Image (cartoon, helix red, strand yellow):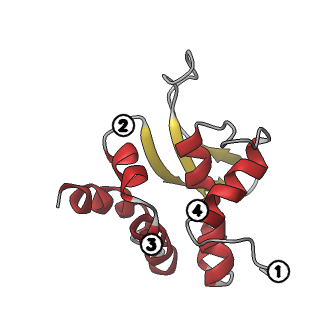
């Protein structure tokens, strides 16, 4: 399956953080096929690990924003998602994937981008848990 090979490419970023890698993989496999294909067939979509250096901050290289639909669709995840509860981590990952899928816009009647990402993630089975 083509998307399986490309998921492997996305997961390489997290090889040294196996718990986070497994959580990203779990969410990628749980989202609807249409979303998987949208990500797989868009070269602007990628998943990156936040690289924080104490005293220096963090850096990330991504495409410049361009006209609507032409900018980067990079999802940046923090390493601490490997340490919190699996339920919370998967919710955060799904929420960020929802932002990427919605291109940071609304969903249906929901105009607020944060509420839209939460609602879409919940429709995929990843609701915001009460605790982290």
Give the mark nearest the N terminus, 4 or 3: 3
Closer to viewer: mark 1 or mark 3: 1
Give the mark nearest the N terminus, 4 or 2: 2
SS at mark 3 in the image: helix
In space, the residues marked 1 and 3 are separated at their CA atoms by 23 Å
Left or right of 87 on screen, residue 13: left
Check disc 4 and report the residue beneath it. Answer: 94
Up the image or down, 99 lies above or below 71; here it is: below
In space, the residues marked 1 and 4 are separated at their CA atoms by 16 Å
In the image, 116 versus 22, the foreground residue is 116
Q: Residue at x 51, y 74 (%)?
A: 20
Give the mark nearest the N terminus, 1 or 3: 3
In space, the residues marked 4 and 3 are separated at their CA atoms by 14 Å
Closer to viewer: mark 3 or mark 2: 2
Q: Residues within 10 Å of mark 4 (few under 14, many from 20)?
A: many
Q: Mark 1 and 4 residues: CB-CB less than 8 Å, in contact?
A: no
Up the image or down, 68 lies above or below 117; here it is: above
The N terminus sits in image quarter = bottom left
How far across and down, in percent of the image, does residue 120 sit?
63, 56
Check disc 1 and report the residue beneath it. Answer: 130
Q: Which mark is residue 120?
A: none
Q: Which mark is residue 21?
A: 3
Q: How many marks?
A: 4
Check disc 2 and report the residue beneath it. Answer: 42
């Amino acid at each position: 399956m083509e998307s399986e090979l490309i998921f492997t490419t996305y997961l390489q970023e997290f090889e040294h953080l196996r718990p986070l890698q497994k959580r990203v993989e779990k969410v990628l496999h749980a989202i609807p096929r249409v979303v998987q294909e949208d990500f797989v067939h868009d070269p602007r979509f990628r998943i990156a690990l936040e690289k924080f250096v104490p005293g220096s901050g963090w850096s990330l290289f991504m495409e410049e924003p361009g006209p609507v639909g032409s900018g980067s669709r990079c999802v940046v995840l923090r390493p601490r998602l490997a340490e919190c509860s699996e339920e919370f981590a998967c919710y955060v990952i799904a929420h960020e994937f929802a932002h990427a899928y919605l291109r940071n816009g609304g969903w249906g009647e929901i105009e607020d981008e944060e509420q839209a990402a939460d609602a879409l993630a919940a429709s995929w089975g990843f609701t915001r848990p009460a605790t982290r």
